[in-house]
Image: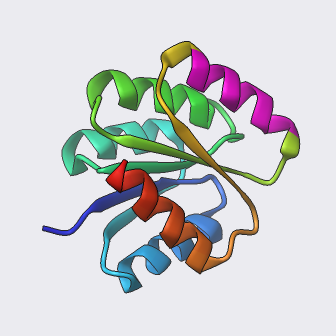
Amino acid sequence: MKQRILIVDDDRLVADTLSLVFRVNGFDSEARYTAADGLDRARSFAPSLLLTDVTMPGESGLDLADAVAREMPDCKLMMLTAYESNSAPVQKHSERTQRPIRMLYKPVHPEELIRAAQQLLLA
């Protein structure tokens, strides 16, 4: 069975492109564009890994990560951001929840993205 990846990013082009990168590399992936839609889809899609943007309008990626972690404790978490300033809040969140979160910075090369996801899924 293919690993399922849920990508949540308010930038539709980014989310759709990342979903395509995962699909071409043998994953089952879907894209959503808000934290609320991401959580709703996660409940039925049951992703192995959540890849979410940190900064989004409304609920943030950290809010989404909290909700997914509570409902799906086996789901791995990966955050994507274009802002170095987001690394401290993500690190604090990871320490507070005692859940590892892999952080990647936009733009991310597809090979790096796939490698990071595979490593996280095997951990």
- Residue 38 drawn at (x, y percent): 42, 44
Which residue is located at x 29 percent, y 29 percent? 73
Say above or below: 30 vs 48.
below
- Rendering colour mode: rainbow
Residue 31: tell me if it is visible.
Answer: no
**Furthest residue in direction left, as rendered:** 1
| Residue 90 placement: quadrant | top right
- In the image, 55 versus 10, the foreground residue is 55
Front residue of this view, candidates 31 and 98:
98
Was residue 122 drawn as part of the magenta stretch in this picture? Answer: no
The residue nearer to you, when weighing 57 against 98, is 98
Q: Quadrant of the N terminus?
A: bottom left
Image check: 109 left or right of 69?
right
Q: Is residue 88 magenta?
A: yes
- The magenta segment is 85-95
The x, y position of residue 61, in whole percent, is 59, 37
Residue 4 in the image: x percent, y percent?
A: 28, 60
* Front residue of this view, candidates 39 and 103: 103
Using residue 72 as the reference point, say whether residue 91 is left or right of it.
right
Side (left or right) of 15 relative to 69 = right
Instruction: Identify the residue at horizontal 68%, vertical 20% (top origin).
Output: 92
Expressed as whole percent of the image width and height from the top left, the position of residue 75 reads 32, 40
Q: Main secondary structure of the magenta part?
A: helix
Q: Is residue 59 left or right of residue 87?
A: left
Q: Relative to 21, is 98 above or below?
A: above
Identified at 78% across, 29% down, the residue is: 88
Q: Is residue 52 above or below residue 11?
A: above
Above or below — where is 55 with respect to 51? Answer: above
Q: Is residue 17 visible?
A: yes
- Residue at x-position 38% and y-position 82%: 25
Q: Residue furthest bottom?
A: 24
